């Protein structure tokens, strides 16, 4: 080895820098999350949680600063430049940011865009260079998430009739005034022929956003009843697969109105103050293939009657496997009737206050009397009571229930396995409990009860504490 080679060592490139152009292009196609958020419980996407596309040192700009081959491959791969996250406010926009956005959009070529805008700007579109640059690309939008003040909604009026490729819409309207308007109507999303997912969340706003309810492509809808036009029937719900409605305004239905949704798998209705609004929706719906039901409202008598009517009309007892009831005054004979009509439920989540002992008595499994007096919820595997509060006697009854669904008992001494103990005759068998969400009040429970929970946890029972609970096993 010469002295010159020792002083000036040869420069070696990493394997990644030696990758051919076509290989890099193929890799880049998998870098961005092109599959738009499909989580049905997801919140409206905020630009603050996404990539900062106007920062040159962030992704995907950083790919152009590794080496020349990576730069060329990144510049000519449009899929890297299809996710647009913008925050539009009243602060002046530097010219460099505008040029950066224009460069970003030009590199996407003619690909469809996923656009997320957080807008607090109040003014005119031509006075904001970011909006002036992004709005003309709306014919290419496939996904659109908008978090906007009610005073800024009119800025997006040019979108009307210019959304031919829009498929997913996430909308959140924030209202700052104390008395929200009840008459504002917006139709910028009315003509979107390919729209199949609508997630409309609002704070206190009561504006009506006319959606393409006539579109037979509509599969997922989340929104308040105030956004549904008064003259529009609910027949469009017949094509839905997933539906979440906030009953913030009473809908007047004609006598004899009924809506059948044979494809609907998950139904969620939310209303804290007026159970009559929630029941009015339940009284017209028939969902024969319902799998998941979520109800969050007050007034257990009205709600229990509405749920019973829905179950009896739909005859979905064999398909309904998950039920979530967030009803403060849930405990009572009315709700026991509801639980008796959902025998195949696997996952049950309840939220209630001061539940009484009698509410859990019919859940207890006794193999000696089960044939003549079977317990309810025989297929229950996951029970979440993490947000419930119980009376002291109800806590004991709840422990008796969990013990009856988990501990094999005296039969274990004779070598009987848990499978045989809980199986019995096929038409009388019960499922062994797998998960138990401990109520909040158990943070102040006696040590003896916590000791029992520790033993069950070591044996394999998954125990989860409710929110706010400070104790851990």
Image (cartoon, rainbow, N blue to C red):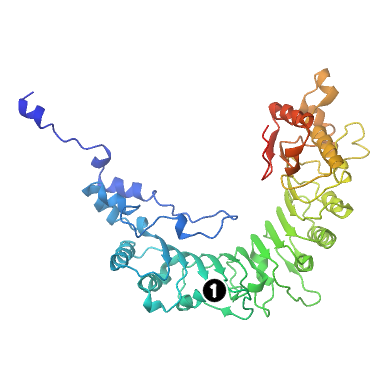
Judging depth in this view, the residue of 334 and 17 nearest the camera is 334
Q: Could you say which quadrant of the image residue 104 lies in? A: bottom left
Q: Return the x and y of residue 413 as percentages of the image width and height.
A: 82, 18
Give the farthest residue toward the top: 414
When the figure is inspected, residue 280 is found, relative to residue 297, above or below; the finding is below
Q: Residue at x 68, y 36 (%)?
A: 471
Residue 116 visible at all? yes
Judging depth in this view, the residue of 191 and 447 nearest the camera is 447
Q: Return the x and y of residue 416 as percentages of the image width and height.
A: 80, 22
Judging depth in this view, the residue of 365 and 385 nearest the camera is 385
Left or right position of 259 against 51: right
When the figure is inspected, residue 444 is found, relative to residue 79, above or below; the finding is above
Q: Which residue is mark 1?
A: 150
Q: Return the x and y of residue 290 as percentages of the image width and height.
A: 72, 56
Q: Quadrant of the C terminus?
A: top right
Q: Could you say which quadrant of the image residue 221 lies in? A: bottom right
Dot 1, how many residues are within 10 Å of its Cα: few (below 14), some (14-19), or many (20+)?
Answer: many
Q: Residue at x 77, y 50 (%)?
A: 318
Left or right position of 212 against 345: left
Q: Return the x and y of residue 184 as percentages of the image width and height.
A: 59, 80
Residue 161 visible at all? no
Q: Quadrant of the N terminus?
A: top left
């Amino acid at each position: 080895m010469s002295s010159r080679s020792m002083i000036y060592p040869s420069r070696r490139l990493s394997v990644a820098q030696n990758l051919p152009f076509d290989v890099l292009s193929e890799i880049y196609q998998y870098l961005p999350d092109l599959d738009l958020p499909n989580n049905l419980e997801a919140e409206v996407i905020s630009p603050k949680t996404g990539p900062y596309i106007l920062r040159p040192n962030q992704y995907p700009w950083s790919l152009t600063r590794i080496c020349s081959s990576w730069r060329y491959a990144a510049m000519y791969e449009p899929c890297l430049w299809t996710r647009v996250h913008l925050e539009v406010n009243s602060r002046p926009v530097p010219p460099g940011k505008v040029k950066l956005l224009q460069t970003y959009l030009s590199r996407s070529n003619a690909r469809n865009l996923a656009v997320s805008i957080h807008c607090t700007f109040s003014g005119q579109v031509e006075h904001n260079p970011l909006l002036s640059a992004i709005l003309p690309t709306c014919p290419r939008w496939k996904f659109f998430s908008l978090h906007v003040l009610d005073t800024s909604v009119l800025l997006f009026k040019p979108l009307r009739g210019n959304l031919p490729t829009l498929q997913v819409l996430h909308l959140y309207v924030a209202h700052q005034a104390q008395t929200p308007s009840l008459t504002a109507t917006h139709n910028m999303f009315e003509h979107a022929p390919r729209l199949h997912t609508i997630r409309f969340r609002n704070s206190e706003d009561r504006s009506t956003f006319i959606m393409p309810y006539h579109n037979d492509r509509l599969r997922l809808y989340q929104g308040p009843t105030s956004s549904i036009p008064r003259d529009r029937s609910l027949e469009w719900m017949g094509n839905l697969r997933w539906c979440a409605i906030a009953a913030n305004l009473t809908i007047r239905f004609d006598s004899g109105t009924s809506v059948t949704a044979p494809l609907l798998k998950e139904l969620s209705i939310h209303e804290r103050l007026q159970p009559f609004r929630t029941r009015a929706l339940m009284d017209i719906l028939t969902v024969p293939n319902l799998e998941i039901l979520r109800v969050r409202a007050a007034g257990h008598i009205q709600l229990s009657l509405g749920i019973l009517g829905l179950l009896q009309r739909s005859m979905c007892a064999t398909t309904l496997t998950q039920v979530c009831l967030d009803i403060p005054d849930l405990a009572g004979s009315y709700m026991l009737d509801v639980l008796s009509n959902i025998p195949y439920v696997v996952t049950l989540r309840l939220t209630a206050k001061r539940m009484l002992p009698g509410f859990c008595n019919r859940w207890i499994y006794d193999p000696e009397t089960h044939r003549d007096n079977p317990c309810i919820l025989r297929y229950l595997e996951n029970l979440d009571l993490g947000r419930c509060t119980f009376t002291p006697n109800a806590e004991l009854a709840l422990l008796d229930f969990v013990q009856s669904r988990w501990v094999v008992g005296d039969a274990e001494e004779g070598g009987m396995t848990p499978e045989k103990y809980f199986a019995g005759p096929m038409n009388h068998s019960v499922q062994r409990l797998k998960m138990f969400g401990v109520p909040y009040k158990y943070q102040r429970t006696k040590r003896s009860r916590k000791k029992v929970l520790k033993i069950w946890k070591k044996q394999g029972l998954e125990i989860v504490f409710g929110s706010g609970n400070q104790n851990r096993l």
